[in-house]
Image (cartoon, rainbow, N blue to C red):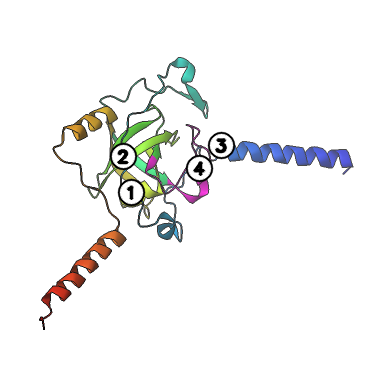
Amino acid sequence: MTERARLRAVIAWAALATVVSGCTRVGTVPPAPAPPADADSLRGADTPRDAAPAAEATPQPDVADSYVVRGKRYYPLASSEGYVERGVASWYGREFHGRPTSSGEAFDMNAMTGAHRTLPLPTWVEVTNLENGQRVVIRLNDRGPFHDDRLIDLSYAAASELGMVRQGTARVEVRAIDPQRVQRNRERLPFPPPQRTSFRERSATLTGGLHRLRILGRPSG
């Protein structure tokens, strides 16, 4: 092989690698992915269980915003209002950690996020595992999964909270949330909503309380 032919081969392989890396999320979600070996330690005890809905500027999709994957064209919805649907959820994690999502944000396997083919980005949704009743609130910031038999792709953190990591998929209900309505409900509360605390913080509080009880229970003199 001449030097010029060798150079052409290297360039061709580099171009192919670029295309493959940019399309990894399309059609490569395994039916039952294994959880990362140290995923729980990576996530940490202080990771919030739910995403906190907040009103954000949502672009209004139109025909120009449609996109094509595997020869099929998808049309993002103009609004998520009233959206409720049931289907199969899958999840993705370490393999895509740090890669850009369809919204331009970096994917964080430890954040409460997900991917949907047509709901506006961002959209807040409540996902319920119909097999065990577990629920989480997540923020959609990506497109997918591009499998006809799947409805939504979840981050590792969300899948973990729903108890579906080991089996890889689960039957779920996806319900869109209106962040502005959530905010209005919060403002009407007579007292602030309870703050989520980590297991470490709850343990420290309990230990401190027991210590004080021991001191108070000691006989004087």
The residue shown at (25%, 32%) is 183
Give the SS element for disc 2.
Answer: loop
Left-right relation of 69 to 84: right
Q: Mark 4 points at which residue?
A: 28
Q: Is residue 11 magenta?
A: no
Badge 2: few (under 14), some or many (20 or more) residues near its Cα, within 10 Å? few
Residue 39, visible in the rendered structure: yes
According to the picture, the residue beneath numbered tag 3 turns out to be 23
Report if residue 150 is visible in the image. Answer: no
Element at label 3: loop
Look at mark 1 in the image and give the residue it sits on: 48
- The residue that label 2 is drawn on is 52
**What predominant SS class does the magenta segment belong to?**
loop
Whichever of labels 2 and 4 marks the residue nearer the N terminus, that label is: 4
**Picture coordinates of residue 40, whole percent (x, y):** 40, 58
Q: Which amino acid does label 3 sit on?
A: Cys
Nearest-to-viewer mark from 2 and 4 = 2
Q: Nearer the viewer, mark 1 or mark 4?
A: 1
Q: Where is residue 45 in the image (x, y as percent from the top left)?
A: 35, 57
Residue type, label 2: Ala
**Highlighted range, magenta:** 92-113
Query: Based on the displayed image, in which of its 4 quarters is residue 129 positioned?
Result: top left
The one of 190 and 198 positioned closer to us in this rendering? 190
Q: Which amino acid does label 4 sit on?
A: Thr
